[in-house]
Each structure stands twice: as structure tokens, then as C-alpha cells.
Image (spheres, helix red, strand yellow):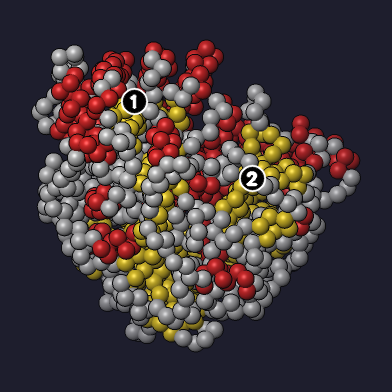
Amino acid sequence: MKLSRQFTVFGSAIFCVVIFSLYLMLDHLQLDHTKSPNNGGDKLQNGQLSILQDKIDRLERLLSENNEIIANIRDSVINLKESVMDGRGGLDGRNMSQGPYLELLALPPLVLPIDSQDCQFAAREFSKPADGVQLLDVYDLLTFDNHDGGVWKQGFDITYQENEWDSEPLQVFVVPHSHNDPGWLKTFDEYYRDQTQHILNNIVVKLHEDSRRKMIWSEISYFSKWWDNIDDQKRDAVKSLFEQGQLEITTGGWVMPDEANSHYFALIDQLLEGHQWLERNVGVKPQTGWAVDPFGHSPTQAYLLKQAGLANMLIQRVHYSVKKHFASQKTLEFFWRQNWDPASSTDILCHMMPFYSYDVPHTCGPDPKICCQFDFKRLPGGRVSCPWRVPPQPITDENVQHRVQMLLDQYRKKSKLFRTKVVMVPLGDDFRYAEALEWDQQFQNYQKLFDYINSHPELHVKAQFGTITDYFNALRKSAIDPGHASVSLPVVSGDFFTYADRDDHYWSGYFTSRPFYKRLDRVLESHLRAAEILYSLTLANIQRFRKLNDFPAVENNRLLTEARRNLGLFQHHDAITGTGKDMVVIDYGTRSVVVYNPTEQDRTSVVTVYVNTPHVCVITDHGHPIPAQISAVWDDYTTASTELSFVAQVPALGLGLYQLSTAVNGGAETAEYVFLRQGGELSVNMKHFTVNIPQDASTPLSIHNPHLQIWSSPTTGLMERLKLKENGSEHQIKVEFAWYGTTSNRDKSGAYLFLPDGEAKMYSPARPPVIRVTKGSVFSEITTTFDHVTHTLRLYNVQGVEGQAVEICNLVDIRGEFNHEIAMRLTSDVDSKDRFFTDLNGFQIQPRRTMAKLPLQANFYPMTSMAYIQDPGTRLTLLTAQSLGSASLVSGQLEVIMDRRLNQDDNRGLGQGVLDNKVTASTFRLLLEKRKPSHLSYPSLLSHVSSLYLNHPLISMAISTEAQSLSLSAFTPLASSLPCDIHLVNLRSIQSKEDGGGPSDEAALILHRKGFDCAFSNRNTGLLCATTQGKIHTEKLFSELRFQSIIPVSLTLMHTTEGGSSKEEIRLKPMEISTYRVQLT
């Protein structure tokens, strides 16, 4: 491809993504916010909802304007043409692509080539360590009885002997912190203006007043904004605090992310953005993770922190019964190990906070009434007080002895829950230390307490301010280091979902709340990743041909950085929500459509664009016609417009080019339609299409493709049976919808809590639905229009991966409901008993067990990319394009909450219900596979690739008429598909450390080798790849580009990996995510 063509295509793609990032810039969509009761009494202003509605209206207007904006941008890109044409001689006449890719991609092999060594990962068995803890076993063990524990309501009475610390004093580290949500009740900018900037300014002043003072900070989104607004003198002062160990950055991500709904791509991206900012600006490398506020915790985050080079982490929001059990067993500090790891390579040292919250009353010890008296912000006369009505007292010479004894009693009791004589006491809360007065109140009073403690050796206590890493260093010295009495710490595997903070208050509602924005998040991730990869490839080719002046690299890098940071803000635990999709209308004459394949696999998939005429034909860039289908876009029972669907074949990470033109004869085939409605007259007004309205509508409906056949009810249009054509087996798979109400108790469902009024009631529409059956050469589908849901089952008539699954789309509208949640339920003949499986963050699979001893809402878990049930012979997998809550309440069932409309707050601080529902489209793929029994459970290769295709669809871009003269052609950057089990997470440009904000000549190549199960058929999968024991030959990766350098580094580029790597070969272990600092030429 000529350089000018690359500019047009790449530029269009990048700017498409930038336009999508604008959606995030509407105050970062701060829409989904809840907290625990300790977070103060702030409430939304009366006008908040109307402001929110205005923002949503602005977003909708932006969507409608998207086509015009992109068209203008594409036209502006053409201005590059002349300068590039002038320099064409410097290209030596070479094409930047491999040359014209084959008219048709190679046919998929009948049997997928899988290396036998690659099957050993899922087949192996290993025993857990002697002191190992598996969370599933803990759930089996617990009774969840919730007895009153006394002053520690959710725990038990703690006792100790006065002489326990005579031989080894108790070390106390008080860790000041301030949790700053990047948007909750206020927007990011409002919080920064009103509170956060003052907190950060005070850090500089107040820490310099006394070298014994310490502070930790987590959110780089705020820190970077503040840094940009301070002078060099203050920056130097901040750097000196880092050097002296008084100030520590914990985790170092752009935000403190949600760990249930976030995809691992976004978790990595926001962590990388924060760490890269730190490296460029302050030279700090975080050592410890700090996660006090995410609503449950995922081992995926633990793995990512470990891969980024962090050694320790802290978590807080864990089910109160689990906390009580861990405290009783002294397992609150443990090595968190991944389920698949038979050794210790993934271990990270983790501290679980034992009590209810991270505020001061719940952190010094088990009695919040006592601890609150040592939160000196609550001194009499202030704006906050102690709910237990016993206020703090200023520390004086007269009361210091008594107050020390009170406080040490709490410290000693807390230390009895741990295995070492080192105890950590957080000192902070949300947006603390915004005023100089609070700094003086806290630090001066605590210093008086510490001075007294440390000057009385008979107390056998050493107390001090510390950072969280100070604490972990002391813990390691006490528990792990040689030469010390060894204290063994347990190994824990599993996850900490679903979180309950009290009673039956399970936080499983937020797995689904505001699904529109959860879908938006996933689309933004896909488009940002596509833009990152295209930008990096473009930049490498531009540098290769020394045409940097002809490419707006700095401006595009700035836009990409802005998009990264907006997406990062979206991952905050009070923010992540979903999407809408816009389609380009091909509206006149002959148009070119460039199709980008964002996946690392050569791919055959269906592309759909709107057209303004049914008389259209599609040809490749070599002039050969390809199969296409014209379908109606329905508005009730009339056609609003028409759409064109065709089967595109696009190389891995490459660009395909297709010409669309009007055709009087021999154009795309027209879909045929059948309409049904039980017991009612039905008339359909349309033209161009054949429509049949049968009189006898009692015969089951059916559609099929080369792999599958579906039978649906003629009454509801909902699926009842599915047949696998390869072996002729049929299975009962019934789709239904159901309603959940909310309990009549005082505490009801809200944005985060799911408190149903019992089992779901089956959805029963007030009138018979309209059923529409579409049959065509490219796809066939059955669509049912209910009052609240438009449900579509689609089969693609392709031989590739997308022909293997049933696509399900639900367009949900519950805006007129009162305290209702709507669920889709799949009931099958799979004998799954009480077991099912959900993914964590799109990265790994977590086994689940439905437990009758738990309330219904406790058996719902987050589903980021898939959930499945299985028996010894069959697996039924539901792949999802958005994060939602899922369960398997009965053997053979999978259930997904689609949307929630709740009229009240759930008393977690938000101050409102969930009433801003939008019409939301949720998309799934249903995959039925035959299997052989296996010990461990991983997705099949087909399931992995199907999920990849669902979340990263082909991206189509219409080229304006003026750009036709550029003579665009296909682009094939990779020499071939990557191995089936290796995913290119990102190819991300690295910003230069020089002033100006442009890109460097390096990029971060992030790869993930997925663990898969070989217990499935590898015949007729449609995959165009193989497995290679995790090996990639770097010289054979790209078709034209070559690696000038390739350096293994930690996940976020902070550390260089020991031992180096061969420049000729990359080798990944199963499940491993690895990053390489690369230079392409």
C-alpha cells in the first residue's frame, strides 16, 4: 500500500476512536456511584438528575453528529496526499503491505492442529499447599450465621495476655491515607477543585514540617492534574518527600479500579498509564497495591500487580463472614496465588483488613466506639462527630497515659488476628486532610501518643507513622526473612465475590446496574485498542521511510493519550458502565469500505452497513463479486431503511477493501420474511422484500446454517431446541425472560445491592408478541418483539468461527417499570447440578457453586466475558459483549440480569435509585460443544476466539468520494495469524520523555497466552491457526517490519526482566501475560 493510502486509512481509524473518546469526556460519565455508610452525609443536589439528563442528551446528539464529524476528518486527511506523492520516490516503489492478499483466505483445516504439549496444561493435576486455602472450600465450610460478636459486631471477642510482647515488642505502623474517588457524588473536576488539590497541597507543606510524618496516595488521575498546575519549586519538594520515604505512591494506577466489571485490557491500560506517567515525571516505582474501596476483589488484579513488579497488596471489601473466618484462623495475611499455578510464581503478599470499613472507627481495633475517639478530625466543634456519642479528646500531659492504654488495648487486640507482632493501622477516610487544621489535629495528637508509647519500654510497643510499604517491609522481616523465627503465611487461591457488608446485603446488583454504559465501555476498549495498534504500525512504517514530517504523530499521540485516560477514569469502581453503536450510511454512487480486523487471527466475518438503496453489489479490490444480503431495518412493522451485509475476509490486524456500487441486476440477494402473531390481525407495510404471513402459525419455527439448526416456539419466537449438525445431536435449550421485584423490608435493592422479593416470576406479556423470521444468504434470524424486550436469535451462514454460535441480542426497555429487574434465563438438558463457571475480567475462569444456605442474591456473580455450565459430555457457554450479573440457580440453567430499574436508594451513600435507564442492546453468543471429562476447567480454543470476535468486531469505515483517487488497497501487517492461544493485548506507543508530548521510537508489545481445554472436538472449528507451545518466532511475525530491539519488561514497563530474552523467539507459559519494549523498523 502506498504511504498516502496508509495515512488515509490509519488517520480515519485513529480519529474514529478519538470521536468515541468524546463520549467519555462528558464529565467522564460519573453515573454509577455508591458507598458505605461511613462516607459522610453528602447528597446529590436537587438538580443533579436534570443535569445528568442534559449530559445524556448531549451524548445522544454527539452520536447523531458522528457521521458528519468523521466525514470531515477523512476529507482533511486527503490534504496529506500531495506531500506524500511528492516523496514517493523515496519509497523505492515498494508496497508497505505484503502484496495483495489472496482473494479468499485459506480454508480452515478440517482438524485444528493442536500441539500435544499444549494439552497438558489443562490436564495436569496438582495438590494445594499444606497451608493452602481455596475460597470455594471456605464457602463450603462457613455457616453464614451472622451472630452478634459484641463490640466487633461481625466478629468475636478478642483477648490477650499482658506479657505476650515481652520478648518481642509489638510494632505499630499508623498509615495516613486519603481516598479520593475520581467522581462519585461530584464530578472529577468538582472534587479536584473543592477538595483534592487542597489535600495534595497540604501534603507538601505538612509532611515537610516533621520528617516523622508519612502519607500514601493512590489515584494518579488526580495527582497528574495537580502536578500540571504546580511550579518547579513545589515539584522538587514533592520529589524530596518521595526520596525521604515520607510520601508513597500505592498501586500507581490511573484510578483505583473496579475488579468485577472491568476487562483485563482496561485494567492493564489504566495501570500502564499511571505507571508511565510516574516514570516520566517523578521516577517513582510503586511497590504495594492499595485497594480499600472496590466492591469485592479479583485474583486477576493480584496477578496484574505481580506482573507489574509490585510485591505486596492490601484489600478491604470482603464478605464479613469470610473476614471473620480468616481472622479466626489468622489467615488475614497470605500469599495470593492463581488457581492455575502449581508452584509459587504468581504469589503476591496480601493483607486483608479485618473490620467493616476503612474509616478510622473501623481500623484501629475491634471496638469502633473506642477507635472513633482517636479520629481527631471528630474533636468537639468540628463538622463530623462520632455516632457512638463519645467524642475524641485532645491529648495532654494529664490524659496521655489513660488514652495510650485505651488505644494500645485496641492495637493489641487487632494484632491477635495476625501471625506476627507487626500491626498496621490505617488513618484516613474519603477526601481526608483537605484542611490544615485536620493535619494538625491528627498528626500532633498521634505524635504525643507515639512519644509516650516509645518512651515507656515497659509497654513493649513501638509506634510510628509509616507508609504501607514500611509496614510490609517490617512484616516480611518478621515473618519471612532468614535469621528470624519463621512464621509461615498461608497460600490462598480464588476470588472474593460476592461481597456482603452486613446481613443479607449482597452487592450483586452493581454487576448489572446501568448496562448501557457497561456496553459502551467495552466498545471503547475495542476501538482504543484498534487505534493503538494502527497508530504504532503507522508510526513504525513512517519512521522506516523517514517521512515523520508528513504524519501528525504528536497530535495523534496526544489524542490517544487523552482517550487512554478517559477510558482509565471509566474503570474507577464508582464509574464503569456500557455502549451504543453508530453505523455509517453508504448513501450515494460508488463507495469504498475499508474493513479493519482488530484481532490477531485471519478472519472471515460479516460486515453490515446502512445503504439507501436495495440495489447494491459488493466487489473486492480486485473486482470479484462476493455474496451479500440486503435486509430491512425495521421500525415496528414498516421498514425505516435498508442495510447491506456481506462476508468480509480480512488478514490479522489488517485492512480489507471492498467496493459498493449500485446494481440494477445481479446485486446483493434480498432477504425473505415471515411474520407471525398469535390471535391477532397483522399487516406489514413494506416494499422491495418478500413477506409471508401464514394463516396456520402452529408449526415450530426453524433457521439453520452449515453448523447449527434452531427451533423456536411459534407462540413466543423463543428458542426451544438446538442441533449440532456435525454429529446430529439435539439439545433442549429454552430461552425465557423473568422479573425480579424488590423486598418489602426496609432495606431494598438499589444501585449496588440486589435484595429481591423471592424467586423470579416468569415474564408474561400483556399481548401476543410479533415474531419476524428473516432468511437470507448471509444470515438468518428470528426476532420477537415483546413490550419490554426485542429478542433476536441470529445464525451467520459462514464457515468460519462466527457460524459456530447462536448470536443473541436483547433490546431492553424497562423505563416504565417500578422496582423491577429483568433477566434472561437459559434452561437446558445439561446436567450441571450445582456447579457453574464464570470468568473474571475476561482473563480467567472461576468455578462457582450454587449454595442453598445462601440467599438467592448471594449466588449471583460477575460475568465479564463468559459463563458456562457443563456435564461429562456437553458444555453450554454464554459469551457476552458486556459485563452483567449471572447465576445458575437450578441445574441446567444460566441466568443473566439484563437491566434494573429501582426507585429508591440502597443506603450506601449515593442518595438516589436507578431511574436513568436507557434502551439498551446487549449482545451474546451461545456456544454448544461436545466434551470429554477433564480435571480442570478452561474455555475451549473455539470459545476463546469466539469471545475475541464478539468483543472485537470488524471495524468498517466508508471512504469519501474524493478519496477514491487514492487507489487504496489491502494491508497485511502480519506474516500470518498468531497461534490460536496467543492474544495480542496491545501494541501501544510509548511517549517520549522529551518535552513536547510526542511518541518515542519504542512501543509496548503486550501478549497473553490463554489457557485452554483440549477436551473438545477440534474438527470443523473454522479456526485458521495452530498452537505452538507458546512460541512466536519474531523474525516471522511481521510481513515487512522487523524488530530492531525486543526487551522483556514488567507488565507496565517499570522493570527490566532478569535474564533477558532471545531476540529471535518469544515464549509464553499458559495464562502468562508478558510485556516487551520493542523497536520496529
**Relative to 109, residue 1 above or below:** above
The residue under the point 76% across, 57% down is 1036
Q: Nearer the viewer, residue 599 or 316?
A: 316
Q: CA distance from mark 2 to mark 1?
A: 35 Å
Above or below, comparing residue 709 to residue 636 in the picture: below
**Which quadrant of the figure has residue 721?**
bottom left
Place of residue 865 in the rendered image (x, y in percent of width and height, measured from the top left): 45, 59
Left or right of 827, for residue 371: left
Q: Which residue is mark 2?
A: 1058
On residue 107, the disc is none
Viewer-closest of 550 and 468: 468
Q: Residue at x 24, y 34 (%)?
A: 411
Instruction: Tell me if residue 133 can be seen.
Output: yes
What residue is pinned by disc 1? 464
- Quarter of the picture containing the C terminus is top right
State the image quarter where residue 469 is shown. Answer: top left
Amino acid type shown at disc 2 = Glu
SS under mark 1: strand
Label 2 Cα crowd, 10 Å radius (few <14 / some 14-19 / many 20+): few
Q: Secondary structure at mark 2?
A: loop
In this rendering, is residue 109 above or below 1057?
Answer: below
- Horizontal and vertical percent position of residue 153: 15, 45
